[in-house]
Amino acid sequence: MRKATLFAGLVAGFSTFAFNAAQAVEIEYWQYVFDTRVKAMDQLITEFQKANPGITVKQVTFPYADYQTRVIAANMAGNGPDVMQLFYGWLDKFVAGGLLAPLPKDAFPHAKIESDFFPIVKAMKRGDDYYGLPTAVRSLALFYNKKLFTEAGLDPNSPPKTLDEYVAAAQKIAKRDASGNLLVEGSTLDMGGQDHQWWREVLIRQFGGVPYTDNDQKVAYNSEAGVKALKFYTSLQLEKKIGAAGFMDEGQAAFRGGKAGMTIDGTFRLGAFKSIKDFEWGVTELPANAQGVRSNYASYFANGISAKAKGEELEASKKFLAYITSPAAMDIWLKTVGELPALRSAALTEANLKDPIYAPFLKGLEYAHTTLFMDEQAQRQNAIDMTNRVLLQGQSVEDSIKQAAAAEQEIIDAAKP
Amino acid sequence: MAAIEQQGAASGRPGGSPGTSFGDRFSMRTRRLVWVWSFLALPILFYAIIRFYPTFQAFYLSFTNWDLLRPAKFIGFANYIKLFKDPQFWKVFKNTFTYLIVGTPISLVVAFTIAFFLDRVRFMHSFIRALYFLPFLTTAAAMAWVWRWFYQPPPIGIINDVFGMLGIPQQPFIRSTDQALFSIMVTAIWAGLGFQIIIFMAGLRAIPGTFYEAARIDGLGEWAILRKITLPLLKPTTVFLVVFSSIGFLRIFDQVYNMTTNDPGGPLGSTKPLVLMIYQTAFNSYAMGYAAAQTVVLFTILLIVSLLQLWILREKK
Amino acid sequence: MSEATRLSHGKVRPGLIVTWTVLFIGGLIMVSPLAFMFSTSLKTADQIYDLRLIPAAPTLANYIAVLADGRFMRWFFNSTLIAVIVTVSNCFFDSLVGYTLAKFEFRGRYFIFLAILSTLMIPTEMLVIPWYLMSSQLGWLDSYWGIMFPGMMTAFGTFLMKQFFETVPNDFIEAARVDGLNEFQIWWKVALPLVTPALSALAIFTFLGNWTAFFWPLIVTTSKELYTLPVGLSSFAVEQSIQWEMIMTGAAIATLPTLLVFLVLQRYIVRGVMLAGLKG
């Protein structure tokens, strides 16, 4: 009896071993730790393995701050992921470091990528090759406090559609005490939050310019449009007095505390704002200009295939990447993480377009731009400083723009690999 | 010192032939030496690996373009040239020295004044001393947030609210390029004051009472006693505190980092100290080689400032 | 002696009353940030604009909310563990090395002493980049050991202990040798008990320094589970979208332990600080 069990065990053990050796390919998927993202990926992996019994996918995660370093260090040591997640802004660094392989054209034909995904996917293209595809994307929208709208005599169901309406609404909402101290902001002004993206990719374009040329390698906002855009932005505080930078410390804190009528923020803020209990809020598209021109800023994490994946592993990686950028995967991602699908067909479904929260963000994706940051942090800081020179030091808008453009060009040039 | 080295050398020579009574003495010395080096083995290893090797490595890295991505390449003085040409560095340099040059004298004068008078107070002495000392025990990163809250514009900032009640105009504090650095400096002085007071009081107590009696017999007034007796005799304490406080200000980081998280070192870089620049260069931009050059500059500044202060304060003796 | 002098001259004069009052008010101003921190931590979100020091309706809800999510408990534990281990290590090694340098004669003693002392001149900031490199190569990033290793021994502690061990009479040590104690036993059982004031000063400084340390833990830790209290608080404050009552509660939790310890051990701590300050 005991012998029989032992024998059966041996056979079973041997057969699994043989089966594994003959068939299974294991690939590694790397991403950074964020609770819902890890859960969503676990679910995707389970689904994928069900459909592809010969492939196992191992998910490896690292803390966000450490993630880039880990990928780079692992590559130097000759191990690392087969498929990895990366922020679109890291692409140049990763390509230059030889970490990524171009997506094979047989599995990911360019025509299909360009027709099916939102246009911002172009940020993953270098030369003739794509280096990654996103599962989900993020965009900006205008959040507004319905309670403050009602108190100011505005219709809480028709938020501003144009910049003029936005300014007018904000002026009505803003409240000050007898000595002129701000009590409630009409709209938050926080260049360190999302306002720098708003200024860069939205306002400049609405005033008839472009922020950069040459694949965002050349600063182009030292122009009439750039000046007008910054004048508009700084006048919100200096002339129209709808708010003040630093009020309640941060824009999103002021909105969350019910002390700001409107704020511009991204999909990633939905989670935090959902916990607001004191008032009802709504979301609408970013305001258009008088001619109806709209723009938006979108960003995303893409998935790319490692340069070290070869043979069987490469084939498995291709299959896995195709799966995690499929509509089915995007649906799981939206439900678990709350980020918008990157494929048109998966995003622009009837249900999503009717959703009062998702719809404004999704509409924004159609006309969104993506800045190809070379050094996101430094470029953001540059925009903060540009605004502060006008707000705090009284520098003229023209001079500040000129200085900022020169400084940013230096940052871009210095960061070129 | 030479004598000690001689002795050390003599006793350090291990004996060769055990067995004789002469050899026993040596073997006892050898045994003691074994003890000595076994006590020191781990610490020597520690200081070599964790202190000295990294020091040399920092110097080496400062001559490379290491950025985590590519292997380090030797680039000579390029990092230093870049640094000295960078206007941001000079701004940071100026900020760092403003913290030092304004912060150190103010905190020492205030600490000495409080210590001087507190030393004479008997009633509830230890309670009042505790009030001044408590801030020293707080965590700078935590208190930075408390101060940040204090400095807010109305309606949430306490200081501005009090100003409002007293009819003083509202101040922008950390939102102003002129006030931000000093607003942060105040928090650093606040946290360090208790320590300096305690040390000054210890220094005051160490001055023998006979000195004062003799001075009074000589008919010296309070002010003259302070100038001619107290301050000169307090010199070692003062030197220690000047160096200690200067180094603290030159290395200021926790407060600035936490009070300016949404515009690090801002507004417009007006509060950014050298250590924050190092942190950003190394751990936000991953320009490790460039950051290493900045740390070498910090090291040099610290060295010069400490030596200079010791020298100046010794000279006048 | 000086005490007596002071008393004989220190009759209560009007000047002294003014001095006392000014010092007392100054002291209240010094603790006011702490007072407002605790007061706000007991207020609800809509009360924080109310400046009264004593909250109208004090509540522990913030503490419950902050502690309930478990992270603060973890950070508290991390900070305590790290500070305790590093303190024990310093008390052991610094005093062992200080004793060896003070009480043994051997070739290289002066050199070792100077070498250790010279590390006082090397700022931590210069070492963090090499430490970071070393940690990443050895897999120490994001680990307790990674946070602790740079501080396991300090030149300051070694110097302090050496100063004090030099005051221990050689006769005691010789007598112990005659009694047949080995060198380690002599240090542990005879010399160390004679310098407990210095040892406790060292312990206080090391513990406080590690409890409040921010720069290196900020760099070396990346996952929330391994944050120390100051780093955790900083990330918590940013993440909390500037909800001041929550931030004040976090700050209060980070501050409370050292304050409580001080209230209990005030006399020893002040004496320890004086000792370390004067000899160090």
Image (spheres, grey):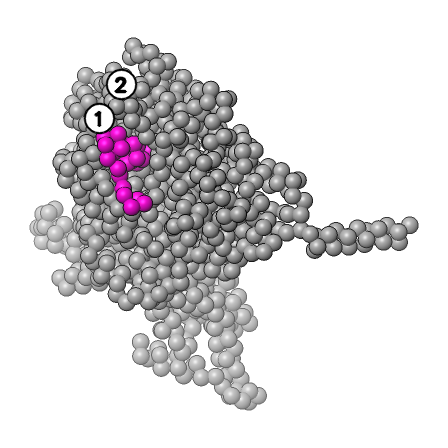
Which contiguous range is marked in magenta? A190-216
Mark in front: 2 vs 1: 2
C214 magenta-colored: no
Q: Residue at image x 14%, y 64%?
A: B315
Chain of the residue where label 1 is placed in the rendered structure: A
Pointer 1: residues within 10 angstroms few (<14), some, or many (20+)?
many
Disc 1 residue type (three-letter) = Leu
Q: In what quadrant of the picture does the C terminus of chain B appear?
A: bottom left
Q: In what quadrant of the picture does the N terminus of chain B appear?
A: bottom left
Q: Residue furthest right?
A: A1
Secondary structure of the residue carrying tag 1 is helix
Disc 2 residue type (three-letter) = Glu
Residue bearing mark 2: A165
Residue A294 visible? yes
Tell me if residue B149 comes above or below residue C162 in the rendering.
above
For the residues labelled 2 and 1, the Cα–Cα distance comes to 13 Å
Q: Residue at image x 33%, y 47%?
A: A374
Q: Position of residue B49 (x, y in %)?
A: 43, 66
**Quarter holding residue C160:** bottom left
Residue C140 - label:
none
Chain of the residue where label 2 is placed in the rendered structure: A
Q: Position of residue C16 (x, y in %)?
A: 19, 36
Q: Residue at image x 29%, y 32%?
A: A202
Tell me if residue C190 comes above or below residue B286 in the rendering.
below
Residue bearing mark 1: A236
